[in-house]
Image (tube, coloured by chain):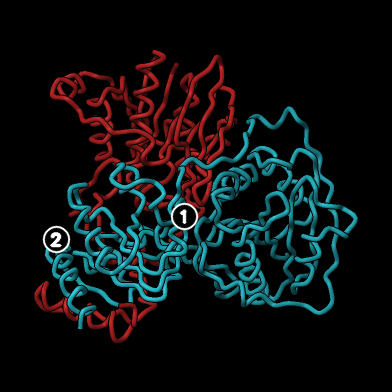
Amino acid sequence: MNIFVCLKQVPARDSVIRVDAAGSWIEEPNLSHEMNEPDAFALEEGLRLKEKHGGEVVTVSAGPARAASTIREALAKGADRGILIEDDRFTDVDTLATARALAAALKKESCDLILTGLQSDDAGFGQTGVILAELLGLPHATIIMEVNVQEGAISVKRELEAGWFQNVDIPLPALLTIQSGINKLRYATLMGIKKAKNKPLQRYSPDELGADLTPSQIIRRLYTPQKTKGTQFLEGSPQEAAAKLAEKLKFEACVL
Amino acid sequence: MSVLVVTEQRAGKWHKMSWEALAAGQQVAEALGTEVSVAVLGSSIDPSGTDSLAQELAGNQVSRVLTVQHELLEDYTPDGYASALRQVIEKISPRLVLFPHTYQVRDFGPKLATSLNRPFLSDAIAVRVEKGELVFVRPLFQGKMNADVSLAGDPPYFASIQSGAFRPDSLKKSETAALIESVAVSLEGAEIRTRPGEWFRESKGEVDLSSAEIIVSVGRGIKDPQNIPLAEELAKALGGEIGASRPICDNGWLPLDRQVGSSGQTVSPKLYLALGISGAIQHVVGMKGSKTIAAINQDSSAPIFEIADYGIVGDLFEVVPALTEAIKQAKEE
């Protein structure tokens, strides 16, 4: 089975995010980056499916040059090769443009199964996978918690709202967006990291692929949300702050 | 060039977020100086105009109610719903199509928009009209930022409305029922490629957090499963239940039935105490109805503080044991 996993590199989870001078995106230079967490679960699922059913795991990313390190990380964990569509504009371009670039690269390949994380931890649109499936003419299912492969088809467990689930049968080729927590992530081994250096990483520019990066969703202004409640911050040592909170809960909120 | 609101129902029961999307539709249509129509899809929607769901919609200030009935719309499928709605949109040419930001809409909304070569703005928490142009507000970076976003190109524009952004009680009712109109769509069995199964629930002996009066909830900040008892002791001192954000349950540190948020339970206790929870929107939608919210977090810019009544910026491993003691003492006094 030829499995393609789409990966996004995003600012590290605990990053302090600041708005840039133009006021329309974040200050990038001092940020550290990591693999988008839901994508890490998609990668792990791809690796497990390959181990069970054979084939190849190829990771694909659309991002600036630094995104190559996220692909290398995936190769170190066991992916066979990587594809990077490289352009600085991918940091803040919208989902439709990103998906068009991914689709252009994937059209050159023979895919049985495409996996993405269900959303990114930065922009959080949660739709690149769905758009990609439509652009490639593939059926899809989202927020997947389990994948079972049958002959020429798969059965997946889809998460619904409020604790409900549903099984869905889908013919292959297909695209799935993977929910965090579907599996347990592996770490790269030293041997894996060594091997990754010699695994192929194909680079494209959007131009080579004929992909148009004109955004259709335009961020006019980025800003820190206004607090809707006047939060009372309780200060002092941990003991002092805790004592103040206990008092507030007893006399103001009346919950004790 | 009207506004079209697409509602969500299953087996004759509304998804409650439909009303919030309709309230948004009414307000945006007014700002645009246009009309709002509302659509309901399903296999058992009676096209004659006597359907009870359609009549319920018709009691609101809308220009018309569109019923979309087809036997292949019985169980939701992305292929079926996207195809049916594409036909509706091609017939009535709306300027803006609004959806509730449900899991189902996330599954087919972007597909529908893409098939018409249009973008889909997901997760809007506000919509306004500036010089005749639509401007949407949506959260980014796990709620740490908001962005004003506009959509380029020609209509139709597509957007989904996040839970809690528009109040269902702001819906404008109408004394005269709106016109109910059936829109015929053609669907072929062969174009529906996925086979959906029955809905099911997994956990047995489920904990019902929705009736808890006090919930102490833990997030990533708890760092290690060995630290969970810290929170449990606090919950015990308060006489409350323990809850968690998604990553904690994903890691198996607490069972799934303790999960609060869009994929878990929706709660509204008297007190919700969030320990090391940043406040991503998926969590917040499940607990923001709580009467009092207190949060302890190391990061003073964590979005949880936007909705908290009381906040302590600090190390929860120091604050929580102190709080447990302080609560015990306050209860004795």
Specify the quadrant of the image occupied by residue A36.
Answer: top left
Q: Amino acid at mark 1?
A: Ser
Q: Chain B takes which shade in the image? A: cyan
When the figure is inspected, residue A138 is found, relative to residue B250, above or below; the finding is above
Say which residue label 1 marks: B262
Q: Is residue A85 visible?
A: no
The residue depicted at 56 percent of the width and 16 percent of the height is A152
- Image x and y of residue A163, in percent: 49, 48
Q: Nearer the viewer, residue A113 or A148?
A: A148
Query: Which of the two marks, 2 or 1, is nearer to us in this view?
Result: 2
Q: Is residue B112 left or right of residue A51?
A: right
Q: Decide: is B265 above or below A39.
A: below
Residue A48 position, x and y percent, is: 35, 23
Count of residue discs: 2
Q: Is B140 placed above or below A134 here?
A: below
Q: What residue did someone put label 2 on?
A: B317
Name the colour assigned to chain A in the rendering. Answer: red
Q: Amino acid at mark 2?
A: Phe
Where is residue B175 shown, x and y percent of the image? Answer: 81, 79
Please give the name of the residue rendered at 52% of the width and 68% of the height, measured from the top-left corner: B135
Query: Disc 1 sits on a residue from what chain?
Result: B
Q: Position of residue B265 (x, y in %)?
A: 46, 56
Q: Which residue is drawn at the image coordinates 53% and 45% (left, top)?
A: A164
